Image: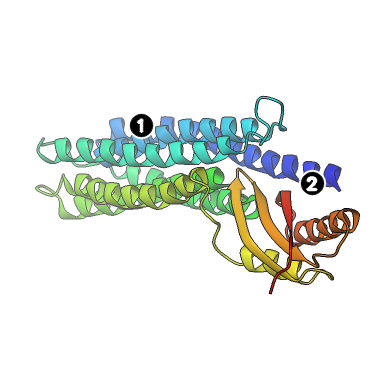
Amino acid sequence: MKTTRTANKFGRAHQGIRAAQTGLLVNAGLVVVKFLAGIIGNSYALIADAIESSTDVFSSLIVWGGLHVASRPADETYPYGHGKAESLAGAVVALMLLGAAVSVTIVAIREIVTPHHTPAPFTLVVVAGVVLIKEVLFRRVFKVGDETGSTAVQADAWHHRSDAITSAAAFIGIAIALWGGPGWESADDWAALIASLVIAVNGVLMLRPALNDLMDRMPDGEIIAQIESAARAVEGVREIEKLRVRKSGLNYSVDVHVQADPLLSLHDAHLLSGKVKGAIRATESAITDVLIHMEPYER
């Protein structure tokens, strides 16, 4: 059982690392394409988009590193494992999203007050391609993050979605600038400014779950109810109390007080605790550590 859970743990980490590697390669290519297209095509929204994409490269590296560290087994120095590295990576990526929003805002405001040429028509094709690629990448990476329960991978996915939003805003701005003609050159800069607000909101939304994991907040959803139901269903369990669950990286640790017949021998109480532990672990493969406190049942 332990070997299977260890394999599952490393399998989920490997999925996340592969998703980060894919994002890294795609983003590196898009940064070059968008920056050159923005310079040649006079689109500062596209340049701002390239700046945001450059943070995606670093965020993918951070997620990669965080998952690599989180997948390490527990040792004498870190007896509870290295799972917090994954949550820390997610928090850093979310902060980078906020930093990207500030960067795009500064560039957009500067270009709004600085007269410049109308963007070249070919930049629309570039931006449309970027939107399509980043949206597909978001969906694939987010699916991996959802399947593995990785906060860092989900944050990285939202980085891709934010890039798609920035590119979509750039497309609208460039289209307006081309359609409006003289006097509308700054339309793509206003589009970049609006996109920066969307990026900032996504950054805040992704920072919260990462901080919750770092602060050992009780997880939401059905997992608590499933654990409680599984423990109560074990024959011999009279009552349970002080159920605590915390998420560490891709895995969960459970601490629960189980009340049983006060006349049980120490041996029988030990056997009962093992049954409860097995029942709890059976509810969710991500539960790797269960600590049972046996107590006498008192009415």
Secondary structure under badge 1?
A: helix
Label 1 crowd (10 A; few <14 / some 14-19 / many >=20): many
Quarter occupied by the C terminus: bottom right
Q: Nearer the viewer, mark 2 or mark 1?
A: 2
Question: Who comes first in sequence, dot 2 or dot 1?
Answer: 2
Q: Residue at x 29, y 50 (%)?
A: 195
- Residue 109 visible (yes or no): yes
Which residue is tagged 1? 35
Horizontal side of residue 125 vs 254, given as left or right: left
Q: Position of residue 100 (x, y in %)?
A: 33, 38
Which residue is tagged 2? 5
Q: How many marks can you see? A: 2
The circle drawn on residue 293 is none
Q: Position of residue 5 (x, y in %)?
A: 79, 46
Horizontal side of residue 258 vs 275, given as left or right: left
Horizontal side of residue 72 vs 128, given as left or right: right
Above or below, 62 relative to 9: above
Dot 1 amino acid type: Phe
Question: 278 or 45: nearer the eye?
Answer: 278
Label 2 crowd (10 A; few <14 / some 14-19 / many >=20): some
Q: Position of residue 70 (x, y in %)?
A: 63, 35
Which quarter of the picture shows residue 265? bottom right
Question: 270 or 5: nearer the eye?
Answer: 270
Above or below, 222 relative to 117: below
Q: Position of residue 298 (x, y in %)?
A: 70, 70
Q: Residue at x 57, y 48 (%)?
A: 141
Horizontal side of residue 187 vs 137, given as left or right: left
Q: How is the image coloured?
A: rainbow
